[in-house]
């Protein structure tokens, strides 16, 4: 694929367009709930991140403050207990700090650096139970932190989310590898290819596993892999597509081509605002699909001979978890500091190293 008109080629036009850019308004039909332990979860997630060396740079500390992991956890996972709220905030912190190193830093264009980190994470995820965080074969801060967190998840989650989580994290890491190649070439995929990659590279599948595991939706595989899995992926698309309209400024700054607004602009010759408005239209249509499938699943739990009826409580809980997660996620991205920042962006360092300011 030829190199698109992006970044330096259109920098002045992009900056001028951003002065007029407006994030679309989204309307989610379910009420927002907030876990009462969100402030404690924020404190504990920061303390945990510091203990494992995830905040040893100004860039990481900036991101930790801006993401507001306790509020994210509290809105996204409102029906868990105190320990669950803390574990969810730790997962949010770990995921954003890991992902930002590659989305926003030079290592996101270096396959060798990424593969070294991936190898350690793969080792952590291969153990059942997971290896301890002080295992001598683990050296990177993010790998040691994941070993600690995966160990807590392993003991907290019920059977079925526990079995799925590690596989879904590995899927996410494989998608990240494809992202590294795209960034290195500063290439934009076509819309269809991007949407397939986005569903996996956003880490929503393992994140939904955490929502189910921390809020007690223990849906067996023979039910989970069917219509309910389709509903999960629709929820993921609603999170990810809308989020790309919030991150346009950041992605232009860091020259990150993985953004649906930028892909649509390039693929369909739209302005930034036109592309963002088209994303909003896609979200509206997908929200209708989600509601239709959720209603069908609820009906199926009342049909005695249908497999969904045998695990009715878990399926209904799983649907409610996704609805809570959607309303909470949209509240978070509309209000958090992470997407209100307009200047002072700092470039992440390689795991364990210090960055240069930018």
Image (tube, rainbow, N blue to C red):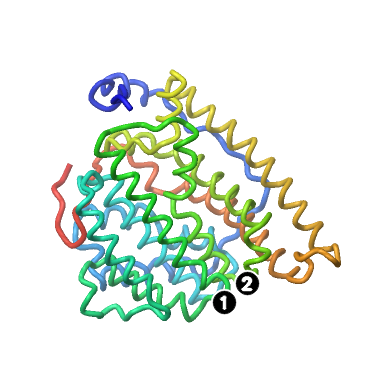
Q: Position of residue 216 (x, y in %)?
A: 61, 73
Between residues 332 and 111, which one lies in front from this camera angle?
111
Q: Is residue 22 left or right of residue 307?
A: left
Q: Which residue is mark 2?
A: 218
Q: Quadrant of residue 56?
A: bottom left
For the question of whether residue 342 can be seen, the reply is yes
Q: Quadrant of residue 214?
A: bottom right
Residue at screen point 47% across, 58% down = 72
Q: Position of residue 59 (x, y in %)?
A: 23, 52
For the question of whether residue 15 can be seen, the reply is no
Residue at screen point 48% across, 33% down = 23
Secondary structure under badge 1?
Answer: helix
Q: Is residue 348 left or right of residue 163?
A: left
Report crowding for label 2: few under 14, some 14 to 19, many 20 or more residues within 10 A (C-alpha).
Answer: many
Above or below, 305 against 260 in this view is: below
Q: Earlier in the sequence, mark 2 or mark 1?
A: 1
Residue at screen point 54% across, 27% down = 278
Report the disc number at residue 205.
none
Alpha carbon distance from label 2 to label 1: 7 Å
Contact between marks 2 and 1 (CB within 8 A): the answer is: yes
Report crowding for label 1: few under 14, some 14 to 19, many 20 or more residues within 10 A (C-alpha).
Answer: some
Residue at screen point 68% across, 64% down = 223
Above or below, 312 against 23 in this view is: below
Q: Position of residue 182 (x, y in %)?
A: 31, 38
Q: Is residue 151 left or right of residue 114?
A: right
Q: Position of residue 162 (x, y in %)?
A: 51, 73
Q: Which residue is mark 1?
A: 159
Tell me the quadrant of the picture where the C terminus can be found.
top left
């Amino acid at each position: 694929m030829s190199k698109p008109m992006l970044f330096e080629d259109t920098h002045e036009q992009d900056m001028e367009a951003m002065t007029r850019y407006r994030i679309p308004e989204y309307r989610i039909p379910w009420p927002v709930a907030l876990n009462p332990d969100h402030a404690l979860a924020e404190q504990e997630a920061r303390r945990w991140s510091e203990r494992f060396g995830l905040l040893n740079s100004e860039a990481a500390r900036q991101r930790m403050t801006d993401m507001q992991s306790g509020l994210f956890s509290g809105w996204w996972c409102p029906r868990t207990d105190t320990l669950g709220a803390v574990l969810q905030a730790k997962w949010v912190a770990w995921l954003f700090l890991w992902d930002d190193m590659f989305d926003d830093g030079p290592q996101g264009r270096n396959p060798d650096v990424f593969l070294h980190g991936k190898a350690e994470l793969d080792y952590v995820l291969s153990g059942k139970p997971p290896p301890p965080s002080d295992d001598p074969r683990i050296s990177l801060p993010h790998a040691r932190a994941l070993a600690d967190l995966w160990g807590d998840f392993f003991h907290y989650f019920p059977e079925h989310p526990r079995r799925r989580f590690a596989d879904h994290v590995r899927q996410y890491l494989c998608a990240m590898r494809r992202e590294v190649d795209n960034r290195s070439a500063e290439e934009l995929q076509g819309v269809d290819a991007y949407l397939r990659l986005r569903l996996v590279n956003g880490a929503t599948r393992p994140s939904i596993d955490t929502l189910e595991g921390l809020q007690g939706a223990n849906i067996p595989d023979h039910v989970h892999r069917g219509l309910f899995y389709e509903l999960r992926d629709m929820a993921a698309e609603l999170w990810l597509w809308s989020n790309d309209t919030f991150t346009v400024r950041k992605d232009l700054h860091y020259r990150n081509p993985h953004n649906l607004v930028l892909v649509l602009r390039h693929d369909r010759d739209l302005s930034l605002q036109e592309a963002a408005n088209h994303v909003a239209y896609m979200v509206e249509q997908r929200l209708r699909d989600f509601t239709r499938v959720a209603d069908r699943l609820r009906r199926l739990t009342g049909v005695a001979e249908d497999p969904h009826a045998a695990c009715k409580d878990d399926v209904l809980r799983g649907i409610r978890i996704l609805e809570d997660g959607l309303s909470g996620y949209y509240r978070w991205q509309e209000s958090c500091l992470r997407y209100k920042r307009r200047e002072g962006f700092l470039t992440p360092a390689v795991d364990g190293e210090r960055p240069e300011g930018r």
